[in-house]
Image (cartoon, rainbow, N blue to C red):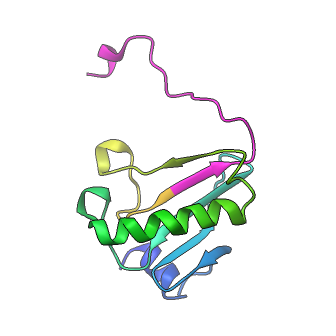
Amino acid sequence: MCIFCKIVKGEIPSNKVLENSDFLAFHDISPRAPVHVLIIPKKHVENFQEVDAGIMSKATEFIQQTATTLGVGNTGYRLITNCGKDSGQEVMHLHFHLLGGMKLAWDHKQSDPKESF
């Protein structure tokens, strides 16, 4: 069982922001911004490539509600999901990072994109 499934089951504590029957939002333990939460479906889905449209339609409303609850719905936020090991996904359970609370820089630049190939 993955760590996020254990959080959903209450076996591992989390600092919850919002929860409903399908999703859970909780503070990231290593925040990269003043607001940094993880949003996960309670049902285990490995990554975005595996998710069905039904879950995503519900996720949209939950993510927007989470942003509003955190006070960044109107000021702006970044929403990130990694899909698979090559993208940097560390926990193989679909999750979205919602970051905000400050003007966010875009620091994923390379001088020459060909250098990474």
Residue 85: percent from left, percent from top: 30, 49
Residue 116 painted magenta: yes
Q: Quick one: which residue is furthest to the top in this view?
A: 112
Q: Quarter of the image containing the C terminus?
A: top left
Q: Is residue 72 above or below residue 115?
A: below
Is residue 58 found left or right of 24 in the rendered image?
left
> Residue, x 58% and y 70% (percent of image)?
25
Can see residue 93?
no
Q: Quarter of the image containing the N terminus?
A: bottom left
Residue 49: percent from left, percent from top: 25, 56
> Residue, x 61% and y 69% (percent of image)?
26
Q: Is residue 32 above or below residue 7?
A: above
The dominant secondary structure in magenta is loop
Depth order, front residue of 49/32: 49
Q: Is residue 86 above or below residue 112?
A: below
Depth order, front residue of 26/21: 21
Q: Is residue 50 above or below residue 111?
A: below
Depth order, front residue of 26/18: 18
Can see residue 54?
yes
Q: How many marks?
A: 0
In the image, which residues are magenta?
97-117
> Residue, x 71% and y 50% (percent of image)?
74
Depth order, front residue of 29/27: 27
Residue 12 painted magenta: no
Residue 46: percent from left, percent from top: 30, 65
Is residue 116 found left or right of 10 in the rendered image?
left
Residue 31: percent from left, percent from top: 66, 52
